[in-house]
Amino acid sequence: MTERVSATEWETLRQAATEVAARAYAPYSHYHVGAAGLADDGRLLVGCNVENAGYGVALCAECGLVSQLHATGGGRLTHVVCVNGEGTVIMPCGRCRQILYENGGPAMQLLTPEGALTMAQVLPQAFGPADLEAVAASQS
């Protein structure tokens, strides 16, 4: 089970996400997004959105966060917060909820506009690696 973090720790994550949101590359939407999270070994990870003239190839902040997770040693996400350019907590899009679930699992906590929720609450009945493993096992 993922350990709960204090309000002070959530605020530290929100501030880190706000700082990185200021560095987002958003020349088209002008909607800056930052994400900050903790890895299971205590690393603080951040990511910001990076837009592209071909809109479909833009990178969400959560993608940058997960990339940093793997680039700096892997592990699992335990706590994540996403904010807009003003530092207001926002919900990740559906695609990013799936990415966070894959890299944090059902117990990972996400700070939402309604408070901290587990990924099992945010993305109930999620599709994940266990589903692929079950299919592979049934074909063996």
Image: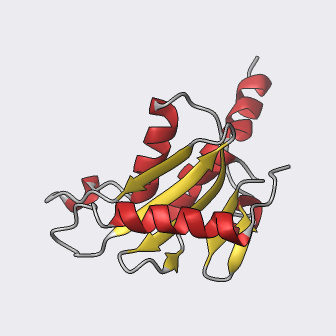
Q: Which residue is at the front of the view, 95 or 92?
A: 92
Q: Is residue 2 above or below residue 18?
A: above
Q: Is residue 84 left or right of residue 50?
A: right
Q: Is residue 137 left or right of residue 92?
A: right
Name the image quarter holding residue 133.
Answer: top right
Q: Position of residue 16 (x, y in %)?
A: 47, 61
Q: Is residue 92 left or right of residue 124?
A: left
Identified at 48% across, 81% down, the residue is: 88
Is the C terminus in the top left, top right, bottom left or bottom right quadrant? Answer: top right
Identified at 67% across, 69% down, the residue is: 8
Q: Which residue is at the front of the view, 65 or 43?
A: 43
Name the image quarter holding residue 53.
Answer: bottom left
Q: Position of residue 113 (x, y in %)?
A: 61, 81
Identified at 50% across, 47% down, the residue is: 45
Identified at 75% across, 67% down, the residue is: 121
Residue farthest along the right direction in this orientation: 1
Name the image quarter holding residue 21.
Answer: bottom left
Q: Position of residue 52 (x, y in %)?
A: 19, 57
Q: Is residue 5 above or below residue 83?
A: above
Q: Which residue is at the front of the view, 85 or 139?
A: 85
Residue farthest along the top direction in this orientation: 140
